[in-house]
Image (spheres, helix red, strand yellow):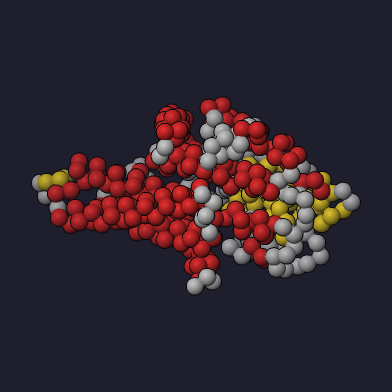
C-alpha cells in the first residue's frame, strides 16, 4: 500500500459494500449481475484502473487493480467478474491493439458502456490453447468466423469478445493462432446457456457460438496474423497473478470468518475457540495466510517492476490456490454442520474457490510450465 492507493481502497470498499454485498444473493439466483452495475462502476472510476488516462482509464498501475480485487473478495463477490474486464481484456487491447482499436474500445470499457470478455476455451480443448478449432477465414476485407467457446466469463453480458481463433491455412500448432475482436451485435454471434456451476453462481459464465460471423480485417488484434499465441503468453502471467491475489484474500477472509464464528459458538459449555484443536488449526491457517500473502506481494512487486516471469506466475497460481482450498476446507470444518449451509460465507467461499485450481490454466499445466525451466 502507498498513499495514492488509500483513497482507491476507500472508494472500492464503499462501492463493494453498497453496490455488491446487498445484491449477491439475488445475483446468485439469476446467474448474472445487473447490467447497470457496470455503468455504476464506470461512473465512480473503478473500471480500467490501470489503463492510461488518454484512453479513459484511471492512469494507475496493477496495484490499483489489486486493491479493487481485494475489496471484492472480502465482501464475497466474484459476480461482476471485473477482473476479466479490467485486468485481462483491457490489457490485451492496450498491449497489442492498434491505436484505432484502443481509441475505439478502451474509453467505452472504462465508462461501463462496453463489457468485455475473452474467449479462449473450447469444448474438448481445455487448457490446450494450441488445439483451438475456431477459425477466422479471410474473405476479402473480412474474416468469417466459425466455432464454439465454453466457460466464458462475462459471456452473457459481453458487448465485445476477444476471440482466440485459427487464421491462415494451418490446422494445428501455435503459429497460426490470432486474436480477433467480435462485437456482440454481429450476425451469427450466439450466446448459449449460462452454465450451472458448483460455485461462483452469480457470474455469467456462458457458452458462445460463431456461425459465419463476419468482422472487418481491422478487428484483428494487432496488425499481423499468427501473433495470437505470443500475445496470450505475454498476458497470461498477469491473469495468473490475479488468481493468486484473490486466493490470498480468500484465505484471509476465511480466517476472519472462522475466528469470529468459533469465538461466538459454544460447545460442551465453552466457546469452540477455547478448544486447543481449534486454536492450533487456526494458527496453522494464519501461518499459511501470512506466507501466501508474502509470496503474492513479492510477485505483485515483481510485476510492477516488469520482472514477473511466466514460471514464477505459474508457481504463484498453483501454490496459492492449492493452499487456499486446504485452508478454507479447514475453516469450513471448524464451522461444523453450519459450514455446509450456503447462507454462511464460509460455504460460499469454499465453493467459489474450487475453480481457481482449474481456470487460468489448470494447476497441472502450471507445474508443466515450471518444469520446463528446471
**Residue 61 located left or right of residue 72:** right
Q: Along the line of sight, which residue is nearer the eye, 358 or 284?
A: 284
Q: Quadrant of the N terminus?
A: top left
Question: Looking at the image, which residue is at 65% across and 47% down?
Answer: 95
Residue 193 shows in the view: no
Question: Looking at the image, which residue is at 52% across and 43% down?
Answer: 62
**Residue 82 located left or right of residue 120:** left
**Residue 346 located left or right of residue 133:** left
Q: Along the line of sight, which residue is nearer the eye, 305 or 186?
A: 305
Question: Looking at the image, which residue is at 78% across and 59% down?
Answer: 167
Q: Position of residue 237 (x, y in %)?
A: 54, 55
**Residue 225 located left or right of residue 77:** right
Q: Position of residue 107 (x, y in %)?
A: 66, 33
The residue positioned farthest toward the right in the image shown: 140
The residue positioned farthest toward the top in the image shown: 43
Question: Looking at the image, which residue is at 58% across and 47% down?
Answer: 88
* Position above or below: 45 against 152: above
Query: What is the total number of numbered labels drawn onto the structure image?
Result: 0
Amino acid at each position: 500500500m502507498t498513499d495514492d492507493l488509500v483513497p482507491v481502497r476507500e472508494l472500492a470498499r464503499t462501492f463493494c459494500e453498497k453496490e455488491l454485498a446487498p445484491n449477491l444473493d439475488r445475483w446468485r439466483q439469476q446467474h448474472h449481475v445487473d447490467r447497470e452495475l457496470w455503468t455504476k462502476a464506470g461512473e465512480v472510476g473503478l473500471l480500467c484502473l490501470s489503463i492510461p488516462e488518454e484512453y479513459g482509464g484511471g492512469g494507475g498501475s496493477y496495484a490499483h487493480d489489486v486493491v479493487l480485487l481485494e475489496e471484492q473478495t472480502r465482501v464475497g463477490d466474484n459476480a461482476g467478474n471485473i477482473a476479466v474486464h479490467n485486468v485481462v481484456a483491457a490489457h490485451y487491447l492496450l498491449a497489442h491493439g492498434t491505436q484505432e482499436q484502443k481509441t475505439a474500445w478502451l474509453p467505452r470499457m472504462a465508462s461501463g458502456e462496453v463489457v468485455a470478455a475473452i474467449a479462449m476455451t473450447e469444448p474438448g480443448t481445455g487448457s490446450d490453447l494450441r488445439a483451438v478449432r475456431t477459425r477466422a477465414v479471410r474473405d476479402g476485407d473480412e474474416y468469417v468466423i466459425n466455432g464454439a467457446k465454453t466457460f466464458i466469463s462475462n459471456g452473457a453480458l459481453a458487448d465485445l469478445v476477444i476471440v482466440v481463433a485459427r487464421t491462415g491455412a494451418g490446422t494445428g500448432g501455435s503459429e497460426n493462432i490470432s486474436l480477433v475482436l467480435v462485437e456482440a451485435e454481429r450476425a451469427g454471434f450466439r450466446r448459449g446457456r449460462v452454465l450451472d456451476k458448483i460455485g461462483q453462481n452469480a457470474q455469467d459464465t456462458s457458452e458462445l457460438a460463431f456461425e459465419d460471423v463476419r468482422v472487418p480485417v481491422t478487428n484483428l488484434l494487432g496488425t499481423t496474423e499468427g501473433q495470437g499465441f505470443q500475445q496470450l503468453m505475454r498476458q497470461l502471467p498477469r491473469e495468473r497473478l490475479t488468481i493468486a491475489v484473490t486466493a490470498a484474500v480468500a484465505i484471509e477472509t476465511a480466517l476472519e470468518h472462522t475466528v469470529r464464528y468459533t469465538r461466538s459458538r459454544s460447545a460442551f459449555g465453552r466457546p469452540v475457540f477455547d478448544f486447543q484443536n481449534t486454536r492450533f488449526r487456526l494458527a496453522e491457517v494464519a501461518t499459511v495466510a501470512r506466507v501466501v500473502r508474502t509470496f503474492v506481494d513479492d510477485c505483485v512487486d515483481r510485476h510492477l517492476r516488469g520482472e514477473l516471469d511466466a514460471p514464477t506466475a505459474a508457481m504463484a497460481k498453483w501454490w496459492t490456490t492449492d493452499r487456499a482450498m486446504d485452508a478454507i476446507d479447514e475453516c469450513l470444518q471448524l464451522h461444523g454442520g453450519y459450514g455446509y449451509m450456503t447462507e454462511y460465507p464460509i460455504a460460499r467461499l469454499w465453493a467459489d474457490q474450487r475453480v481457481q485450481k482449474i481456470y487460468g490454466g489448470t494447476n497441472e499445466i502450471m507445474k508443466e510450465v515450471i518444469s520446463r525451466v528446471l
